[in-house]
Image: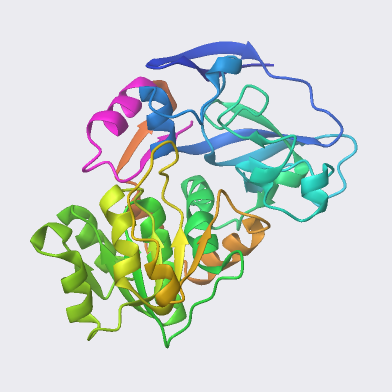
Amino acid sequence: MRAKVAFMYGPKDLRVEEVEVPELAANQVLIKTGACGICGSDVECYEGVSGEGRYDLGPYTPGHEWGGQIVEVGSGIRSTLKAGDKVTGDCVMGCGVCANCKDGRMPSACLNFREIGFRSDSPGGMGEYMVVEEQYVHKIPDHWTYADGAWVETFSIGYFGIWGNGGSIDASDIAIILGAGPVGLSAAMVAATSGAKTIVIDPLKMRRDTALQYGAEIVIDPGAGNIIEQVMDITNGHGGDVCVEASGNDSAIASLFDIAAHSGRVRLIGHSVGRKVSVEIGKTIWRTLGISGSGGTKDFGQRTIRFMDRIYNNFDFSALNSHHYNFSQLQKAMDVAVHEKATALKVMLDFD
């Protein structure tokens, strides 16, 4: 069987080609793609400003945010997955057998590291069909759309960013989310669901307005005045018990150690790899701050789906997709994601 599949050959070199769909290994499933989101990481790889997309190893199929339907399963699968199931999947793919995986470390520590949608050995969802090993595939509810399934990977980052690696939050906390992009909004929904007082900081009015619909009680414009003074005024000098940095912005990162409450939990999930950020790290000592990063997630796929389904009627996930394009309009969709970042909250590719 042949299918149209996108390949990233290098910066600004995204091509759709018709190729033969690989034969299934015993532990793999064949999925007909229903929807695939364009992530900020995809945009940066396309622009040539990120090393995450490994086109230096060969052209690869992007798309780590996807939803689809199984059309065939391998002869030796051990899970309950079957043809007809609506599914999505993990992004960071630990092998499960190397020393680091056996030590229970994050999948990003895997010595045989793969990342769906960023490498030629793990093609993503920007194609009519995709082949994935069963252990990375998760069933989604039948009443969800494929685009809902494509949101699972993004939501899992915000969810794990707060709860993963020993994190916690409850109604006694003040949560501060820096950045109201898709991941920041996901973290805001998680914080709000816990009952925490949730504050979201973002310079874009459109994103601040969106945050108010997705969990934020209060939004702050960092351009309206000193961000530390604004936070302390709103929290009566307390600061944030849980501070989630989801923007990757240097100023936002530097402010963390001033806006966090004493004994606050600082959760770093915004991308800033490749540059140094000036911070007053000594404040972590006197404020007894706990700092945690999370590159990807671990064992949160099914939990994320259950969490999202519990709040499915509380938040309109479909409205988070600011733009829809058919896969045949891939280049136009990518151009919008690249050039209209202020308004393109989530560009979603739909498949016939």
Position of residue 5 measured from the top left corner of the image (x, y, whole percent): 55, 19
Tell me which segment is drawn in magenta.
Answer: 329-352
What residue lies at 37% left-to-right and 16% top-to-bottom? 12
Does residue 264 show up magenta in the picture? Answer: no
**Whether residue 264 is situated above or below residue 112 in the rendered picture:** below
**Whether residue 303 is situated above or below residue 351 in the rendered picture:** below
Does residue 344 show up magenta in the picture? Answer: yes
Position of residue 88 measured from the top left corner of the image (x, y, whole percent): 61, 46
Position of residue 257 measured from the top left corner of the image (x, y, whole percent): 35, 66
> In this view of the protein, which residue sits in the foreground, 71 or 267?
267
Instruction: Give the residue at the far right of this rendering.
Output: 76
> In this view of the protein, which residue sits in the foreground, 73 or 239?
239
Position of residue 159 measured from the top left corner of the image (x, y, whole percent): 51, 63
Image quadrant where one finds the N terminus: top right
**Whether residue 55 is situated above or below residue 129 in the rendered picture:** above
What residue lies at 17% left-to-right and 72% top-to-bottom? 230
What residue lies at 22% left-to-right and 86% top-to-bottom? 236
